[in-house]
Image (cartoon, rainbow, N blue to C red):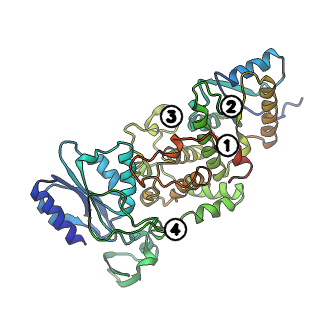
Amino acid sequence: MQEVMKKRAKELLASGEVTRVIGWKKNEFDYDITPAVFETAEAIDRDFVYDDFCGPNLSKFTFQHQKNDTKTLVFLKPCDTYSMTQMVTEHRVNRDALYIIGIPCFGKIDIEKIKADGMTGILSVTSEGADVKVHTLYGDKTYVKIDVMAERCLACKSKYHTIYDELIGEEGEVMETDRFDQVKELEAMTPDQRFEFWRGELSRCIRCNACRNACPACTCESCVFDNPESGIAQKAAADSFEENMFHIIRAFHVAGRCTDCGECSRVCPQHIPLHLLNRKFISDINGYYGEYQAGEEVGQRAPLVNFTKEDVEPDVVAKGGK
Amino acid sequence: MSMNEFKPKIVAFCCNWCSYAGADLAGTNRLNYPADVKIIRVPCSCRVNPMFILRAFQRGADGVILCGCHPGDCHYTTGNYYARRRMTMLFSMLDYLGIEKERTRVEWVSAAEGAKFAAVMNDFVKTVTELGENKRLEDLRCKK
């Protein structure tokens, strides 16, 4: 797959169809993958990589690194295409200056799960089919891929590409998922238990803003959290209120536009399950205003900038929900 | 009345065209409602950003109520329909985080409903008084 992608990228660069390529690049470790812009065939040969660690959603990176005067090639996994479609709908990227190649995804590996299993001194990790071979200073170990897959990939919502100019590999389908199970579990708790649960999670927040920066729906150029008047612009959350408020507002600002790509939870250095906040909004929207998946097609109207005269009243929450 | 009796702080966001006039009517009709209610006038219920509500809690409010025109009667035609969706989402999220759902409320009060305004405020203040102080969504620096 990686070689096919490299070849196609070099072809498009050589023909002048595109002048830049957005893809993934390996850092010091096998599992340390970062988005990158490639401008020459040599750079692609040297650095370009696509493997089971290429988790970063390139849609947000495209938004930050797109140029209007030249065409950019970008490789998108199925869940990245949902984010891209949403950004095109919101006119946050210039679709005409993009050449999108859809690529298949078979689930990404979460290195934290391997590390949590006690693996230290990791030298390399290779993934072939269902086997993940970890080579360390102290010996080798082979995992079954499903055991070390990222949580978001275990509840994968779709293998279908919603936007592309060209596909490599075969088109997949929208999947049945149980992604709202955890939300339901939380909803079934008492308010006191929920409060304790979220205090335990959110009190770990260090306000690094990584969740905001990585989120493909958070594309405002000036953000409310950077406004000194907002009351929560500190570099560190001063108390429990700010922790709660930051996360409520962050999730609220993407409510109805969040495609549930899971980047927020992936980038969180404190491993806070932020996607559970977004999924709560998605499940509420589905329950109250009808099934809605953001980023399914260009031109959709998000539920929170829409209404019907028959909408439920807000006191439905006090009465016990759906 | 004892000194220790809990008096809640209630913030009421009232839309300029209906509920604020409704509050005015309650006043001219000499209907009583608790002085714990602090009214903030907004051009439309839709003007209320979820952050306003959280900020009110941050600064020490024990309950926040949003009053607007009845759906269909908005001065700007559709504002309160958007507010309705937004507040449903916000209240549901607050409940999800374990914050008492009785502390927030939306009521539709028209300019002719002075009596309803007074009744709603009496009821809301009573509910919040029973709940007690807002402990779960407060900023310690703001409570001096």
Q: Position of residue A206 (x, y in %)?
A: 48, 51
Q: CA distance from mark 4 to mark 3?
A: 38 Å
| Residue A169 seen | yes
Query: At 48% from the left edge and 55% from the top edge, which residue is drawn?
Result: A293
The answer to whether tags 3 and 2 share a subunit is no
For marks 4 and 3, the one nearer the N-term is 4
Instruction: Determine the chain carrying the residue at label 1.
Output: A
* Vertical placement of residue A54 versus A96, above or below: below
The residue at which mark 4 appears reads as A177
For marks 4 and 1, the one nearer the N-term is 4
Q: CA distance from mark 3 to mark 2?
A: 30 Å
Q: State the mark number for residue B70.
A: 2
Q: Position of residue A101 (x, y in %)?
A: 26, 60
Q: Which one is in front in this view, the residue at disc 1 or the one at disc 3?
A: 1
Task: Please name the amino acid that badge 2 sits on.
Answer: His
Query: At 78% from the left edge and 35% from the top edge, which residue is drawn?
Result: B124
Q: State the mark number for residue A314.
A: 1
Task: Please name the amino acid that badge 3 sits on.
Answer: Ser
For marks 1 and 3, the one nearer the N-term is 3
Q: CA distance from mark 1 to mark 3?
A: 26 Å
Q: Position of residue A11 (x, y in %)?
A: 13, 62
Q: Residues within 10 Å of mark 2 (few under 14, many from 20)?
A: some
Q: Position of residue A123 (x, y in %)?
A: 30, 76
